[in-house]
Image (cartoon, rainbow, N blue to C red):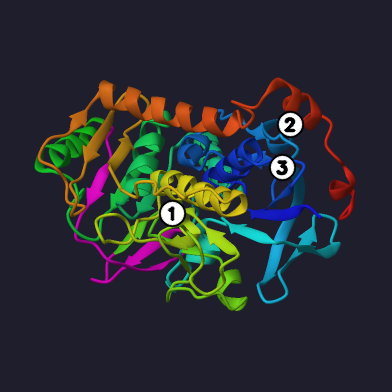
């Protein structure tokens, strides 16, 4: 029987790992199934652009995996049972079923965290998924149609908050945009990068509210800890991310916030035939610190997981991929940006790159990431590409 590999999630980590496993493992010995709720590959790092009104092409996963032999299941993961080695899924039409696996790769990613703040789920917008980004886009469109503008309040000054606020301000100059920072704006950046960020916000007309704590979100305003109320026609919540409770519910060893605890090879410390990468994994970097949720982390941990799975299935030595967090690449609209590298202690280095050069670097990184995911057959022998181009469709029909 073939060794069954099931990949949960087809984001940056899941799509990359699935494609590379297909490239490096023999289809005669392994069977790879990818489970994803949506038919498209979502460029999460560009969802703030989509929300601001720009057109972002959505590549079909069926096209991405064409020629690889990978079986794509469009379904939502509802549970994981690592003792029985099965995954429960629900199809779009309401049908359900189970997938058995020999090796499971868990990459279900993360979603916006409301952190228990009242009104966030009911009234706030976010850019952590394509549907939610399009929902925000529709709201911004409606404000523009009024002809009198409107107010947009972005809560959170992390990378997502900064990129969202600057993108909306640049793309929709008729709207009034404010950015709420719990502390100093860009506190984790170097002094020069912080100054550059302030200048960008000033140039784009963004009102920055520093040292402001939000306590609740309402339909047309945000309530602050000091008793003030900030008017808002569209509140965008970017205060951190949360992971699915599925791993914890299945009995995998997880952290307090639900991330799967893995060893140096991205293998679950509680269940050796389960691997995790990206936002779903709690991995320790080479500097001894937990790796943050980021696209860069998805790349490094995904590469390590791929090497480990291939090594253990083929008997080869498992190489240690570097596990580092090099820095932050922040877009400030389409023509400006900040490239801030960090040291081994995750502290900002004194120098940074800003302006158009940083924007071009960020664009290049996104293009390289997308290319790597969109060309999983790169390096395959031509004969194997032809064989994989006509995959068995029985798996796709099982949940139809």
Say if the magenta span includes residue 374: no
The answer, for residue 112, to whether it is visible in the render is no
The correct choice, above or below, for 340 with respect to 98 in the image is above
Q: Which mark is residue 66?
A: 2
| Callout 3–callout 2 Cβ contact below 8 Å | no
Viewer-proximal residue among 166 and 303: 303
Label 1 residue SS = strand
| Cα–Cα span, label 1 and label 2 | 40 Å
Say if the magenta span includes residue 207: yes
Earlier residue among tags 1 and 2? 2
Query: Would you name the residue on which mark 1 appears?
Result: 235
Residue segment shown in magenta = 204-228
Q: What residue sits 67% from the left and 32% below the top?
A: 64
Viewer-proximal residue among 144 and 334: 334
Label 3 residue SS = loop
The spot of residue 78 in percent (x, y) is: 70, 67
Viewer-proximal residue among 88 and 310: 310
């Amino acid at each position: 029987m073939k060794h069954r590999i099931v990949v949960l999630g087809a984001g940056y980590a899941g799509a990359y790992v699935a494609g590379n496993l297909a490239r490096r493992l023999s289809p005669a010995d392994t069977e790879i199934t990818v489970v994803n709720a949506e038919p498209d590959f979502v460029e999460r790092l560009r969802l703030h652009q989509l929300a601001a009104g720009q057109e972002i092409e959505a590549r079909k996963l069926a096209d991405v995996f064409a020629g690889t032999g990978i079986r794509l299941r469009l379904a939502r993961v509802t549970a994981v049972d690592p003792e029985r080695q099965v995954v429960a899924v629900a199809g779009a039409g309401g049908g359900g079923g189970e997938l058995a696996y020999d090796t499971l790769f868990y990459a279900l990613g993360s979603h916006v965290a409301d952190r228990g703040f009242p009104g966030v789920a009911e009234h706030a917008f976010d850019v952590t998924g394509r549907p939610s980004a399009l929902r925000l886009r529709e709201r911004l469109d409606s404000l523009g149609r009024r002809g009198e503008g409107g107010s947009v309040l972005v809560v959170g000054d992390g990378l997502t908050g900064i990129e969202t606020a600057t993108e909306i301000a640049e793309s929709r100059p008729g709207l009034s945009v404010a950015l709420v920072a719990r502390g100093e704006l860009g506190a984790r950046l170097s002094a020069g990068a912080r100054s550059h960020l302030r200048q960008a916000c000033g140039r784009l007309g963004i009102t920055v509210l520093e040292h402001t704590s939000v306590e609740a979100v309402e339909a047309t305003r945000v309530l602050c800890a000091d008793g003030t109320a900030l008017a808002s026609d569209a509140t965008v919540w970017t205060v951190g991310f949360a992971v699915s409770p599925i791993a914890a519910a299945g009995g995998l060893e997880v952290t307090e916030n639900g991330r799967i605890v893995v060893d140096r090879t991205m293998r679950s410390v509680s269940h050796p035939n389960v691997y995790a990468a990206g936002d779903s994994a709690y991995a320790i970097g080479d500097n001894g610190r937990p790796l943050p949720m980021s696209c860069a982390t998805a790349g490094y941990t995904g590469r390590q997981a791929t090497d480990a799975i291939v090594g253990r299935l083929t008997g080869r030595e498992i190489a240690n991929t570097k596990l580092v967090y090099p820095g932050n690449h922040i877009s400030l609209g389409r023509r400006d940006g900040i490239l801030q590298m960090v040291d081994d202690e995750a502290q900002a280095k004194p120098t940074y790159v800003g302006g158009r050069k940083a924007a071009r670097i960020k664009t290049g990184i996104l293009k390289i990431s997308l290319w790597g995911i969109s060309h999983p057959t790169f390096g395959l022998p031509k004969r194997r590409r032809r064989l994989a181009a006509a995959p068995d469709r029985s798996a796709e029909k099982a949940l139809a």
